[in-house]
Amino acid sequence: MSSLSGCVGFSPERARLESTFNGTFQTLGSVLDINPAIMIIDNQTLVSVALSVDGVNVWKTFSPGEGLVLDLRGNHGIAANYTVDLNTQFYVNGAAGAGTDSFRISILYAR
């Protein structure tokens, strides 16, 4: 293949273990260095987890076992690229749990 245009890229998964929750907002992986096309947000823990992009305000609270797929290209409206800004940092807030599962964000992007 001579070009990567139109190929999918896989960003490293962002995760935080339930056992590290402490009832305050904590970073979830590193800041975005790519623009996501699809994000899979998955609460694999036994506790409710709040997701934030500023470490203060809750964007959505995920119940235990709840997941969400955001297709940022399927309904882009008038924007040339409907995506999440570069350098966005995700934060999670959950009560300390006894479980060993984690809250995860998996990202696909266009190359």
Image: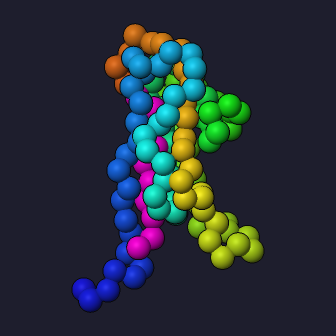
Hey, which quadrant is residue 97 in on the image? top left
* 31 versus 35 height, above or below: above
Q: Nearer the viewer, residue 91 or 70?
A: 91
**6 with respect to 93 (left or right):** left
Q: How are the residues colored?
A: rainbow
The residue most toward the right is 78
84 vs 46: above or below:
below
Quarter of the picture containing the N terminus is bottom left
Q: Can residue 44 be seen?
A: yes
Q: Is residue 86 above or below residue 54?
A: below
Residue 74 visible in image? no
Q: Which residues are magenta?
A: 102-111
Q: Residue at x 47, y 19 (%)?
A: 21
Q: Work out which quarter of the rendered image holds the C terminus and state it.
A: bottom left
Residue 17 point in image, percent of width and height = 39, 25
Q: Residue at x 67, y 68 (%)?
A: 76
Residue pushed farthest bottom?
2
Image location of residue 91, percent across then percent down = 55, 35
In the image, residue 14 above or below residue 8: above
Residue at x-position 37% and y-position 75%: 7
* Dominant secondary structure of the residues highlighted in magenta in the image: strand
Outermost residue on the top side: it is 98
> Could you tell me residue 29's position as x and y percent?
42, 40
What residue is drawn where x is 50% and y is 15%? 22
Whether 105 is among the magenta residues is: yes
